[in-house]
Image (cartoon, grey):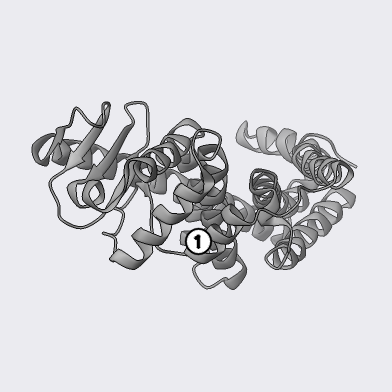
Amino acid sequence: MITAAVLTSLALACAVGSWRFTTAGWTSRAPRLAIIVWQSLGVSWGLATTGAMLAFAVQPYGAGVLPGLIAFGRGETPAQAWDPLHVLALIAGLTALAVLVAVLLTAGVQALRARRRHRMLLALISHDNPSVPGVRVLAHPSAAAYCVPGLRSQVVVSEGALKLLSEDELTAVLAHEAAHVRERHDLVLLPFAALRRALPWSKVVADAQAQVELLVEMAADDRARRYCSPRRLATALLRFGTAGAMPTPHGMLGVHAQHVMARVDRLIKPAPELAASVRYGWIALSVTLLTSVPFLWVIQL
């Protein structure tokens, strides 16, 4: 009973923490750290919510969540008789866990299929250009720049983007897309997209997904400005924002016009870095969440 109560408290704490974190003012100053915090909140909430129901359900076995589920799967007889409340909790917990796993797998499979189809399409309508080696050039008049993530990743720009951007701006945009590929931001976004599918009515989940999408763009901006002028990247973003850039294909990561001014402002006038004590505090919180919830699945309090 204590394990179920602690997991319930953690689930509520993660839910309230996520709601409060949507208004945090420091995230743009440390986007990678903010992404880690969001990931820890999301994973911990999912495990704590399902774990609380399952911890109560397997109480007749007198064991923790994982050992209790293993005993149930083996068909072992519990020390105490089942009652309707424990059976209902077991059904609800397993259903919630199955839904979370199913939506994650579905989102992943759909993304993989979309990328496979897009690679086949690119083979037909794009070409190499000696001026941008290693990049596929799309024969389209609108401005577009995006990456196809995965093991066979590709960076794509349109002919419209080549005409729109100066050489330095193009270098900045390509560095931004290479950052998406190198840091596998598609895997960062996937769980949040899956959670949005599972809870489409939740404003907190919608806000969390939107924030992580913006933080991923800011993280790519930060990596790109190691190799190019921040001002050139800012002017490239402004050009895309005012030129009516082509929408990024489904399942890809690309330059788009969302939150352009917020990204431009932090490139032109970067805010001071977070204090080391604040960084370490948030890291400690994330590590605590990511270790305590799985621990409570194994042991019984």
In this picture, residue 19 sits left or right of residue 151 = right
Q: Residue at x 39, y 53 (%)?
A: 236
Residue 119 position in % (x across, y down): 21, 36
Q: Does residue 207 sit above or below 177 in this rendering? A: below
Q: Residue at x 58, y 72 (%)?
A: 203
Q: Residue furthest left?
A: 124
Location of the C terminus by quadrant is: top right
**Quarter of the image where one finds residue 84:** bottom right
Q: Residue at x 17, y 39 (%)?
A: 122
Residue 231 position in % (x across, y down): 50, 50
Residue 268 position in % (x across, y down): 58, 55
In this picture, residue 292 sits left or right of residue 37 = right
* Residue 77 in view of the camera: no
**Quarter of the image where one finds residue 241:** bottom left
Residue 299 position in % (x across, y down): 83, 35
Front residue of 269/206: it is 269
The residue carrying pointer 1 sits among few (fewer than 14), some (14 to 19) or many (20 or more) residues within 10 Å by Cα, namely many
Label tally: 1
Q: Does residue 99 sit above or below 276 in this rendering? A: below
Q: Which residue is mark 1?
A: 196
Front residue of 154/283: it is 154
| Amino acid at dot 1 | Arg
User: Secondary structure under badge 1?
Assistant: helix
